[in-house]
Structures are given as C-alpha cells and as structure tokens.
Image (tube, helix red, strand yellow):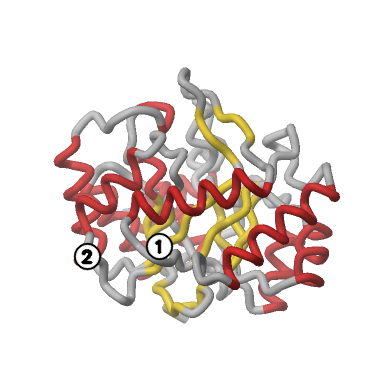
Amino acid sequence: MDTFALGSFTVNRIGFGAMQLPGPGVFGPPKDHDAAIAVLRRAVELGVDHIDTAQFYGPDVANQLIREALHPYSDRLALVSKVGARRDGEGNWVPASEPDDLRADIELNLRELGVDQLAAVNLRIHSGDPNTPGVVDHELFDRQLTAMIAARDEGLIGGIGLSSVSVDDLRIALERTEIVTVQNAYNLVDRTSQPVLDLCTERGISFVPFFPLGSAFNDDNPVLGNPAVTKAAADLGRTPAQIALAWTLNVAPNVLLIPGTSSVAHLEENLAVADIELPADFNP
C-alpha cells in the first residue's frame, strides 16, 4: 500500500517533517535559508503531500519557510501541526497545555501558514518524562480534548491527532471523539509504543513515528549502529538510515513516515526507501 488516510486526505506514506529546517536545536533561523526553501520545493516536486510542522519549530521558523516555499498550496497537500508546547527565549521547550493555549496556538499556526484549516493538529502530551509517554493529569486531558473538538467542529482543523500518548490515553480519547492520527516515538530499537501502533492499525488510524532513526538529540545512535541495519545497508548498497526507514515503513500499512532533513540529497535518499526490499531474514 503506497497511500493511507490522514483524516479527509489520502497521502503518500512518506511525507516530510519540518523539524530540521530551523537552526541547531530546532531554534532560530536555518544556517542556509535558500537550501531550506529548495528542500521543501523539491519534496513537493517528488510527490510529498504530507508535511508535518509546528509553530514551536524555530519558533515560527518552520512555518514561515513552508509558507514562503509553497504558498499557495496544492489542494492535495496535508499540512499537519501540533500544539501543547512553546519555546522560551533561550530555546527551552515549555508546556502550553491549557485549552486557551491550544486554541491560541492553533490560530497562530493558521496565520503563519496562511491557511483557513489544517489537515490535522496533534495534541502533544507532556508527561514530565520524555521517555515515558502518557497523560498524567486526566482532568486537564479531558479539557484539552474539549478544546480540540471545538476547533475541529468550527472548521479550524480537519482532524484531531495525539502525540506521546499511551494506549490507555488513546482509548479514552476514542470514547469521546474520532482521532485521525497518532505521533509517538517508535523505531527498531524503541518499540515501547507497539500497543499504541497496534490499536491504531486495528482502528484504521494513521501512526506517525517520530525519531524513526533514533533521537536527533543524542550523540549515540543505537538505531543506525544496529548490526543488522549496517549489514543490510552494506549488502543492498544503501545507507543505514534508508534501511531503518524501510523497516519502519513495513511494520504496518498505516505507518506514515515524516523523515526530515535540510539537504536535498538526503531528502531524495529518504523518499527512495519505498523501493527497498529488505531480506526475508532481516531481524534487527
């Protein structure tokens, strides 16, 4: 399957994540503005119809680059953002989780991107531990869902997504409303979110793994250094990143990849993973 539903859109299963477009630490302007614009335009030329962004990438930087490069947008382009966090003046990630914060940041994303509606917006959950997804304050979660439902019903967003949730959180949310996408950390080394992926597969919900190549903030990368990955890369004449992405894409038909890069060459490598056939005995 080459495509999957993302709310009212049907998108190619490899999209583009805008997180790497801003400067180091996802903060400040890109080191090469023209290269960032070129990456976005090349992505769309190559068939990317799903771009994942956030106002707090930069902040503001990723959204402004997307608008500069691609506006006016194709009707087929699904723009997806997320709310629940902001950046302070030093670039620290801080929660912005109250319903009024969510509404204000949805509206800010719309203004920055120059659209009347986003395909979907993910509610980013902050558990206090980045390695342990899940809701801590269930009363707040209920109010957050109410705000997201209102934004959808008013037409500001096409669908509601969740990010960094446990399988129990997802079940609670599904009792209240339709969820069109889930973003959780997932890769061939860290499969903590497998129960979430399984429920998404069962319900026909797109699952968007972040950090499919391992965390962008850690020097040590057990994904790209995995012996099975490096062997398959050598045998197939591919990069370890391509092997890891190909494995992730083949985990389930509802997985949508959003690998990010600030390089056209790396973009083209990422989009080529759909053609990779992994060995039958590949077992990372």
Q: Residue 71 bears which disc, if any? A: none
The amino acid type of the residue labelled 1 equals Leu
The answer to whether residue 206 is visible is: no
Q: Position of residue 149 (x, y in %)?
A: 66, 66
* Residue at the extreme top: 90
For disc 2, the neighbor class at 10 Å (few under 14, some 14 to 19, many from 20) is: few
Q: Residue 79 bears which disc, if any? A: 1
Secondary structure at numbered mark 2: loop
Q: Nearer the viewer, mark 2 or mark 1?
A: 2
* Residue at the extreme left: 34
Residue drawn at 34 percent across, 70 percent down: 77
* Residue hosting label 2: 72
Q: Is residue 98 above or below residue 12?
A: above
**What separation in Å lies between label 2 and label 1 (alpha carbons)?**
12 Å
The amino acid type of the residue labelled 2 equals Pro
Q: Are marks 2 and 1 in contact (CB under 8 Å)?
A: no
Q: Is residue 47 left or right of residue 184?
A: left
The answer to whether residue 202 is visible is: yes
